[in-house]
Image (cartoon, rainbow, N blue to C red):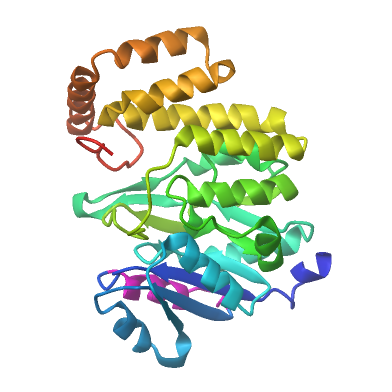
């Protein structure tokens, strides 16, 4: 294992899934080509685009390998890229986002310093660029305190509880580990990326972490990685399945607080969209993960869901106008899911 991380042996494949990304794909590719530590190959998977995505990728010539496939969703596209990659390591980038110049350099240094690691992730900037708003997902100085002068977490679940799960743009994972973990879940529309990182964490909980932002996560294109032929899936079923997986690996105690944190985030989003049925399903199915006070409060908010939606949107608007929110977040959706 350690030989994979020696100074001269790290080979990295950049994998970029793309669906109708003609407005953004050049920016993504250019950010990979601008790395201070170049990757060994760039693979773009055109997932059934109907625009000029493939033509733009071809314009880069042999700098980029293009793979075209019928639309099957972002998980299937990533899997195609992983299986086609020749590098020992895979670094992911969504077509509408971009890497910062030292991303690969910093992560490679992290792996060389800790040759036992099989994956590394990090902080990133969130950007509503049309509103000229950009900020780190988590303040770097606070991350350094959490890391306690290290550049890794002993457990990915510890990072997860602080919302430091790392978006796909900052994940770099050993290719063989991804394959052993089962790759990305094709057809799943709920947390497909987190699903994968959890399965990696069950096998290898220790993860490298870079406190300074490594990429820019753009909120401009909510249709990125769209799956055209999925079906509605249950958040409760996702948590229940990972309950089983965590139990099999003897990691249920680590999983539970992370799962509770994630469900609170989901419930918040569901309150904005008035999805009372699934909120109640989560509360009823996993009562041990929520305090009695929290359950009562959330149940109260679901009694008149339309009123809750209006009030929450009004509060969100006031917070935006007064600039009380430090983080950059996409405006909450109106209406149903």
Residue 40 position, x and y percent, is: 59, 80
Q: Is residue 12 magenta?
A: no
**Between residues 209 and 249, which one lies in front from this camera angle?**
249
**Residue 106 found in image quarter:** bottom right
Numbered label tally: 0
**Between residues 6 and 184, which one lies in front from this camera angle?**
184
**Between residues 313 and 192, which one lies in front from this camera angle?**
192
Q: What residue is rendered at 27% in x and 73% in y?
A: 22
Q: Residue furthest right?
A: 2
**Between residues 268 and 123, which one lies in front from this camera angle?**
268
Residue 270 vertical position relative to residue 231 in the rendered view, above or below: above
Residue 37 position, x and y percent, is: 57, 74
* Res 34 visible: no
Q: Give the range drawn in magenta.
A: 24-39
Q: What residue is rendered at 58% in x and 70% in y?
A: 82
Q: Is residue 268 left or right of residue 260?
A: left
Q: In this view, does 281 lie to the left or right of 172?
A: left
């Amino acid at each position: 294992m350690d030989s994979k991380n020696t100074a001269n042996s790290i080979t990295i494949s950049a994998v970029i899934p793309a669906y109708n990304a003609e407005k953004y794909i050049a920016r993504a590719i250019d950010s990979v080509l601008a790395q201070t530590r170049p990757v060994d190959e760039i693979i773009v998977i055109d997932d059934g685009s109907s625009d000029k995505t493939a033509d733009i990728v071809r314009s880069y010539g042999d700098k980029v390998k293009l793979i075209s496939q019928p639309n099957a969703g972002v998980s299937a596209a990533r899997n195609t890229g992983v299986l086609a990659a020749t590098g020992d390591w895979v670094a992911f980038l969504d077509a509408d986002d971009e890497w910062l110049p030292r991303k690969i350099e910093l992560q490679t240094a992290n792996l060389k310093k800790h040759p036992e690691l099989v994956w590394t992730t990090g902080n990133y900037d969130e950007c509503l660029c049309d509103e000229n708003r950009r900020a780190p997902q988590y303040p770097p100085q606070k991350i350094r305190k959490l890391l306690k002068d290290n550049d890794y977490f002993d457990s990915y679940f510890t990072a997860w509880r602080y919302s430091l799960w790392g978006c796909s743009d900052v994940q770099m994972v050993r290719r063989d580990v991804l394959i052993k973990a089962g790759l990305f879940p094709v057809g799943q529309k709920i947390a497909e990326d987190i699903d994968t990182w959890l399965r990696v964490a069950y096998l290898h909980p220790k993860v490298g972490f870079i406190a300074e932002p490594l990429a820019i996560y753009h909120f401009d294109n909510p249709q990125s990685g769209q799956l055209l032929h999925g079906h509605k899936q249950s958040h409760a079923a996702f948590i229940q399945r990972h309950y089983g997986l965590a139990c099999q690996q003897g990691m249920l105690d680590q999983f539970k607080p992370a799962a509770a944190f994630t469900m609170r985030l989901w419930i918040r989003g569901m309150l904005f969209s008035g999805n009372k049925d699934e909120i109640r399903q989560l509360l009823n199915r996993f009562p041990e993960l929520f305090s009695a006070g929290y359950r009562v409060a959330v149940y109260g908010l679901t009694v008149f869901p339309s009123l809750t939606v209006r009030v929450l949107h009004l509060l969100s608007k006031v917070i935006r106008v007064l600039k009380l929110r430090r983080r950059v977040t996409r405006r909450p959706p109106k209406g149903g899911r």
